[in-house]
Amino acid sequence: MARVTRFAPSPTGPLHLGHAFAALTAAARGDRFLLRIEDIDTARARSDYETAIYDDLSWLGLHWEAPVLRQSERLNLYRQTVDSLEKSGLTYHCTCTRGDIRAALSAPQEGAPVIGPDGPVYPGTCRHAGHRDGAIRLDMAKAMARAGDVTFTDTGRQPGLHRRDAEQMVAEIGDIVLARRDIGTSYHIAVVTDDAAQGITEITRGEDLFEATFIHALLIRLLGLPQPLWHHHRLIRDDSGKRLAKRDDARALAKYREDGATPGDIRRMLGMSLPGD
Ligand code: GLU
Ligand code: ZN
């Protein structure tokens, strides 16, 4: 079976070495390599960053198949994904603001808030409130009763089968938001919808998203989508160990290029072998 991989950058800033590593890793692992622009965060996504992504990737020597998927054009499809989970009775509406959630979590009986891959674990305030509008959350306990244990296979840094049971998913992740009030979707819904639509067989991405993969594997199961493999790769850090993506002054790939670096120099800086090495 052809291995299909993808690179899925958000056009919210210039690509830096960490992105180059993710893109080169994905391309090297696929017989077919696809590109997806994750621009649902319309407040932060910019078209000039998107153009720069194509320039930088071409400069690195990468080729991807047409068409490039742009998430901002697919909001209706994400709505359908959320609808099908709503129809299965696994969701509820939530009208809490961030402040409401913070206040509920700081109540003395709550103990220390657990921070999951989707932020603080939601205290469940609206679970039985019967609201008819607001954000849409997944009722994690119900979802797990339907799906059984969540499993996925990683071919990257933590190779093998990973598993979480209902108790862990409820305590460590909780009732995640499937559809934000403003955009009607969430990263999780968009990513599982698109990886299935693009026929991705191995999802290659940074290990910072490892815990979020339990959410995606669960959604894939609930939606009856094909289960891919995941390849979580190392993150590129600076000399002090800080993740480049989190550093405001992380040097853009375009800057290295202007300074005369070659794509081969970039691969060497990333500790990647050159084609033909
Ligand atoms: N858009 C995400 C990012 O820029 C990547 C998501 C993914 O690979 O699943 O970090
Ligand atoms: Zn709520």
Image: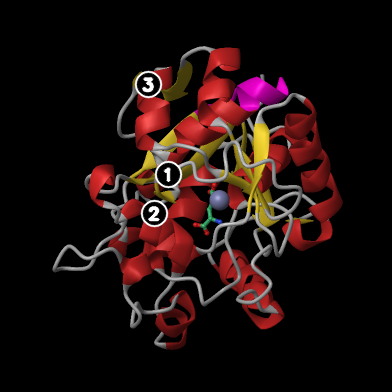
Task: Name the residue beneath numbered marker 1.
Answer: 123
Is tag 1's residue or tag 2's residue first in the polypeptide sequence?
2
Q: Quadrant of residue 216?
A: top right
Assign a secondary structure to mark 2: helix
Query: Which residue sits at x=45%, y=37%?
Result: 174
Q: Amino acid at mark 1?
A: Pro
Is tag 2's residue or tag 3's residue first in the polypeptide sequence?
2
Query: Which residue sits at x=67%, y=82%?
Result: 48
Q: Amino acid at mark 2?
A: Ala
Q: Amino acid at mark 3?
A: Glu
**Which label is found at residue 104?**
2
Pointer 1 local density, CA inside 10 Å: few below 14, some 14–19, many at least 20:
some
Q: Is residue 89 visible from the viewing direction of this image?
A: yes
Assign a secondary structure to mark 3: helix
Q: Is residue 237 above or below residue 259?
A: above
| Residue 92 point in image, percent of width and height | 66, 39
**Which label is found at residue 270?**
none
Nearer to me, 53 or 275: 53
Q: Is label 2 or label 3 in front?
A: 2
So how many labels did they put on this image?
3
Task: Name the residue beneath numbered marker 3.
Answer: 167
Residue 211 placement, left or right of 59: left
Q: Quadrant of residue 210?
A: top left
Nearer to me, 76 or 99: 99
- Bounds of the magenta span? 220-229
Assign a secondary structure to mark 1: loop
Q: Quadrant of residue 167?
A: top left
**Mark 1–mark 2 CB contact (< 8 Å):** yes
Q: Is residue 7 visible from the viewing direction of this image?
A: no
CA–CA distance between discs 3 and 1?
A: 15 Å
